[in-house]
Image (tube, rainbow, N blue to C red):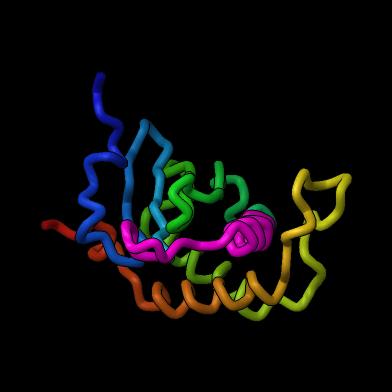
């Protein structure tokens, strides 16, 4: 069987940051790493879920919402994937959008989006303060990120 692209990344040298994972036609996937893989230092379910709700909501309410395809957690619990339409958003614009929404998430003062049984199948572990802390960490990490930094570290 052919190995999928994410399994070709050397997780022994991968550090937190923002990376270009793949391009599939017009769809670009960014890899947002919050935690260093293979350390046991994983995002908790509450961190993953809370950030997902805040950032997905902010992305889908941004001026660039039509270019947003998906934002969601990685199964390995070390970060998130962001998929966007590259015909509508360049890599540089996508970086700026992520910088913007993670800043907005770090200072978010509203109620947690989707925090009800009707809106979410596991609404109980959603927490605005948890999301703010994680968003502040990632915003600080990528606030000066550029297209030149989108390549995965090499062994």
Q: How many labels does the image show?
A: 0
- Of the pair 34 and 27, the residue shown nearer to us: 34
**Quadrant housing the N terminus:** top left
**Quadrant housing the C terminus:** bottom left
Residue 148 at what x, y percent from top left? 23, 64
10 falls in the magenta region = no
Residue 44 at what x, y percent from top left? 56, 62
> From the viewer's perspective, is 80 left or right of 104?
left
Residue 101 at what x, y percent from top left? 57, 67
From this viewpoint, is residue 31 visible? yes
Identify the residue at image location x=81%, y=57%: 115
Q: Splitting the image into 4 quarters, where does residue 32 fall?
A: bottom left
> From the viewer's perspective, is 29 left or right of 62?
left
- Of the pair 142 and 3, the residue shown nearer to us: 3
Identify the residue at image location x=79%, y=73%: 110
Does 89 sit above or below residue 99? above
57 falls in the magenta region = yes
Residue extending furthest toward the front: 40
- For the record, the magenta segment spans 35-59
């Amino acid at each position: 069987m052919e190995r999928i692209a994410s399994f070709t990344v050397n997780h022994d040298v991968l550090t937190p940051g923002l990376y270009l994972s793949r391009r599939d036609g017009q769809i670009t996937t960014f890899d947002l790493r919050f935690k260093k893989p293979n350390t046991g230092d994983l995002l908790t379910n509450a961190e993953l879920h809370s950030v997902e709700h805040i950032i997905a909501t902010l992305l889908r309410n941004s001026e660039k919402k039509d270019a947003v395809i998906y934002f969601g957690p990685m199964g390995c619990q070390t970060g998130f994937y962001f998929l966007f339409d590259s015909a509508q958003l360049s890599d540089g614009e996508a970086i700026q959008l992520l910088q913007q929404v993670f800043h907005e998430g770090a200072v978010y003062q509203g109620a947690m989006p989707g925090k009800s049984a009707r809106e979410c199948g596991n609404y109980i572990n959603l927490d605005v303060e948890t999301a703010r802390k994680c968003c502040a960490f990632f915003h600080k990490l990528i606030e000066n990120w550029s297209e030149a930094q989108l390549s995965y570290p090499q062994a």
